Amino acid sequence: MTSYEDPEVRYTYRSTLVDQLRAEGEFQVGRIRLLMPQSFGFCWGVDRALAMVNDARKEYQGKPMWLLNSIIHNPRVNDDMGEMGIQFLKGKQSVPGALEELNESDVVIVPAFSAMVEEMEDLKSRGVKVVDTTCPWVIKPHKRAEKYVREGFTTVVHGTVGHDETRATCSLVRSLGGEFVIVHDMREAEILARYLEGTLDAQELLSGLHPQAVRKNFEPTPHLQRVGVINQTTMLASESRSIAERLRQALLKRWGEQELSDRFRDFDTICQATQENQDAATAVVDSSPDLFLVVGGYDSSNTRNLARVGDAAGVPAWHIQGPDCISVDCLEYRERHTGEIKTKKDWLPEGPISVAFTAGASTPDAILGQVVERVVAVAGESLGQEV
Ligand code: SF4
């Protein structure tokens, strides 16, 4: 692999329409104004992972090739993996029993989010060839968590229970004999903060968090004397900063300035692509578009958080998976608070409108381009030769 900008990957997933919109920034088509942020779509880590898959297919041609789980959180890209003959060991598309039968003749691709320590050890013990596409940005929270364990801090992860990256980080902490607490949002961080400042008891803390937010036998009193904060790389950056500050204030209140540095650590592990896409989305919704369409897999953390950028600006923001979510009278979307897939009728206003778009770090430009085309068509306009 000579470059992370693998031409084959770019060719497969590119869109000339999106290339042009990216260059223009905004474009008027009849009654509809299309607004594009300065940064969106495939990140460096995804480009790199897909390029590594391409290289592995050439190098290990003829060998059984497996993905430990989704390569990235986008259904189209995962379906493409299946069409290339790469099968899945875990998740919805997995082959039952395949994991237990792996041997030296198999090649296993570890996704960009990394894998649990136990999974990596199992692959090693079976002698399979591992192609590890873990994004270097995901290593950053791992390194910091290792440091926290070494220094006697419990790792507080702003992340999502069950997300592949956070599962991997927590398994690393566990394997080193450390402790972790996962807080998903400001509400859960507030529960932890109130325990840390002494206004909630241990039972109230544990019942307020997700049952898997801590490991079995976690004991708040000994394990929450010293805490270090990290973030899943794809969380909402502004929320991560607020959570760290709230926890810092709680410990300050409980222990005072003198003890704070011995009891609290904070390290921003949001990845650069997430930060840039969120900053660019913030800038585009600041222009108050009538709609903000956020395109990406429903299980994509960074895409979900891009939709929250629209909410924060008071702009109607809809997280959709692709062009099939759009019809003349109905829009299918993921409801942010409940995670339910819902539909909205009469979603496209009449008259002159502006529609801002963005796409998650795992969303191919080709899908975003199809979404733009569908929105323009539903608005009764035609891209024609204009773009
Ligand atoms: S979103 Fe960030 S951490 Fe995830 S693959 Fe892309 S660059 Fe890496």
Image (cartoon, helix red, strand yellow):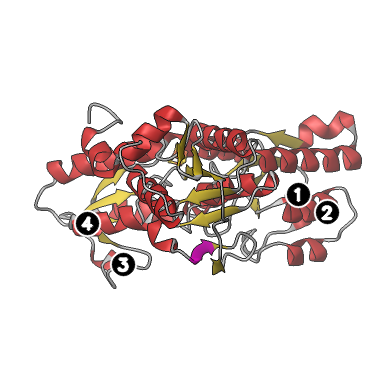
Which of label 2 and label 3 is nearer to you? 3
Residue shown at 64% from the left, 53% from the top: 182
Q: CA distance from mark 4 to mark 1?
A: 44 Å
Mark 2 to mark 1 CA distance (whole Å): 9 Å
> Does label 3 or label 1 sit earlier along the sequence?
3
Q: Is 195 rendered above or below residue 282?
A: below
Residue 224: numbered disc: 1
Q: Label 3 neighbourhood size at 10 Å, few (<14), some (14-19), many (20+)?
A: some
Location of residue 328 with respect to 370 vertically, above or below: below
Q: Which mark is residue 195?
A: 2
- Along the horizontal axis of the image, is 162 left or right of 246? left
Residue 166 is situated, as x and y percent measured from the top left of the image, at: 53, 51
Looking at the image, tell me whether mark 4 or mark 1 is earlier in sequence order: 4
Q: Position of residue 105 (x, y in %)?
A: 15, 55
The answer to whether residue 341 is visible is no
Nearest to the observer: residue 101 or residue 281: 281
Q: Earlier in the sequence, mark 2 or mark 3?
A: 3
Of helix, strand and loop, which one carries label 3?
loop
Q: Answer with mark 2 or mark 4, whichever residue precedes in sequence.
A: 4
Q: Which residues are magenta?
A: 329-333
Q: Amino acid at mark 3?
A: Ser
> How far, Cα to Cα, is label 2 from label 3?
41 Å
Residue at disc 2, secondary structure: helix
Which residue is depicted at the point 69% across and 43% down? 313
Query: At x 24% / y 59%, what residue is drawn?
Result: 82
Query: Gap between marks 3 and 4, in whole Å?
Result: 11 Å
Q: What's the amino acid at mark 1?
A: Leu
Q: Quadrant of the N terminus?
A: top left
Dominant SS type (magenta): strand
